[in-house]
Image: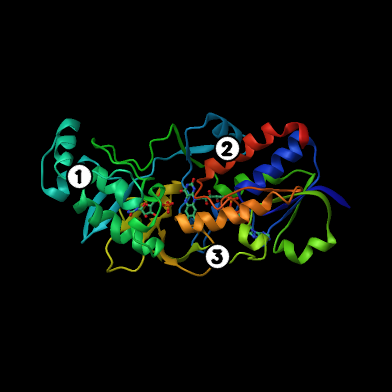
Amino acid sequence: MRYDYLIIGAGFAGSVMAERLASQFDKKILLVEKRNHIGGNAFDEYDEYGILVHKYGPHIFHTNSKEVFDYLSQFTEWRFYEHKVLANYQGDLFPIPINRTTINKFFDLHLTTEGEVKNFLSTKIEKRFPILNSEDIIINQVGRELFEAFFKNYTKKQWNLFPHELSPSVCGRIPVRFNDDSRYFTDKYQFMPKDGYTKMFEKMLSRKNIEIALNTDYKNVLNEIKFDKMIYTGPIDSFFDYEFGKLPYRSIKFDYEHYEKQNHQSTGQVNHVDMEEEFTRVTEYKYLTLQEAKTTTISREYSLKEGEPFYPIPTDANRALYLKYRHKTEQEKNVIFCGRLAEYQYYNMDQVVANCLHFLKSKADTI
Ligand code: FAD
Ligand code: UDP
């Protein structure tokens, strides 16, 4: 048996590529995944109490791309869901992103208009120019007190780096609001797959010309498989056997806990922004999945240096190391590198899908 494409990794990148190549280009695919399931980090499953949980932390789908939304809509129905996050700071709960409510509560104020909030913040902010890191970008918008309360320690816990050691793109993911909008995201499309992500992936991949090999590290089977081209979505440093050294990734330990009560917290995600608790965020999945059940399951996240690679760490030094590996990919004419790990980019799900769709469109004549 000879495959047109050997695809490594059954997350969004590998699965979208497999589905498109099979359905639009009639290619024969072998999709190899080292875990015992498809879906990559978006994998979800019912726990022993019948609650749908995300195995690798909360995955909330949001996008401004109609193309991405329409594409995925072929494989799932959706439930409307707008994510809301509270920060637990010294035992009190505050909306995140920082908005007017956060500011009023934190400074004991009664600001009512966006203009009042802007004026107030202008007395707090320290102008930073150029914006070189994640501390600059936040202090430039809200000043030191809010930065220290809500960003400094949480970021240290999450990355084991302080914000000034990280690219502005990390904390810059979180906007600052002058109104009372407490939604985490403001994208046009904010939905969760009605029956979960895993079901969506199952539908994407159930085609006769896609074969899936789970529990298989491609390095152990590469010599036995005949194929024309490879698509690689695993960690790029691993592909090149760590020739230039290991690229740092952040890992996470997820501790799940079940409670015999309707709810554990008042919203889907609570960020513990103080150093006292070692964990970062607590997710209560029922809010995200809109599942109706009498009991509930949460996860607490402990950020780790070692373990499965989850987050590329955006620093200048890591980017420089990544670029050395990327340079080497140019010699691999038969391999396409895509996804969060292979491109060492802090991508959201929709960005990965968009990149794959665009890649295939732009290269349609050479597929
Ligand atoms: P992955 O999902 O990591 O898939 C890569 C696959 O390759 C994995 O399944 C891996 O097992 C496999 N693999 C690696 N090496 C090998 C090998 N040697 N052999 C075989 N298989 C291999 N995005 C959002 O849009 N919204 C969110 O709310 C959100 N929350 C997140 C929360 C957490 C905790 C994390 C870690 C990420 C979150 N993301 C979120 C990002 C999202 O997970 C990624 O954008 C998406 O999963 C990337 O897909 P991918 O296919 O590139 O990578
Ligand atoms: N962040 C923070 N406090 C918060 C929320 C976020 O300091 O309450 C910082 C932290 O460094 C985090 C980054 O902003 O890693 C991006 O947050 P996001 O919620 O996008 O993280 P992700 O969902 O990717 O883990």
The residue pinned by badge 1 equals 125
Q: In this image, 2 relative to 123: left or right?
A: right
Of pointers 2 and 3, the one earlier in the residue sequence: 3
Q: Nearer the viewer, residue 82 or 14?
A: 14
Residue at 24% x, 50% y is 94
The residue positioned 30% from the left and 49% from the top of the image is 136
Residue nearer the viewer, 24 or 358: 358
The reply to whether dot 1 and dot 3 touch (C-beta < 8 Å) is no
Q: Residues within 10 Å of mark 3 (few under 14, many from 20)?
A: few
315 sits to left or right of 140 = right
Q: Nearer the viewer's eye, disc 2 or disc 1?
A: 1
Residue 134, how many percent across, how many down? 35, 51
**Residue drawn at (32%, 43%), measured in percent from left and top?**
130
Tag 2: amino acid: Ala
Q: What secondary structure is marked by label 2?
A: helix
Q: Secondary structure at mark 1?
A: loop
Measured in 3D between alpha carbons, the distance from the residue under mark 2 to the one under mark 1, in whole angstroms, is: 36 Å
Q: Which mark is residue 354?
A: 2
Q: Callout 3, which amino acid?
A: Glu
Q: Which residue is mark 3?
A: 308
- Residue 312 horizontal side relative to residue 209, left or right: left
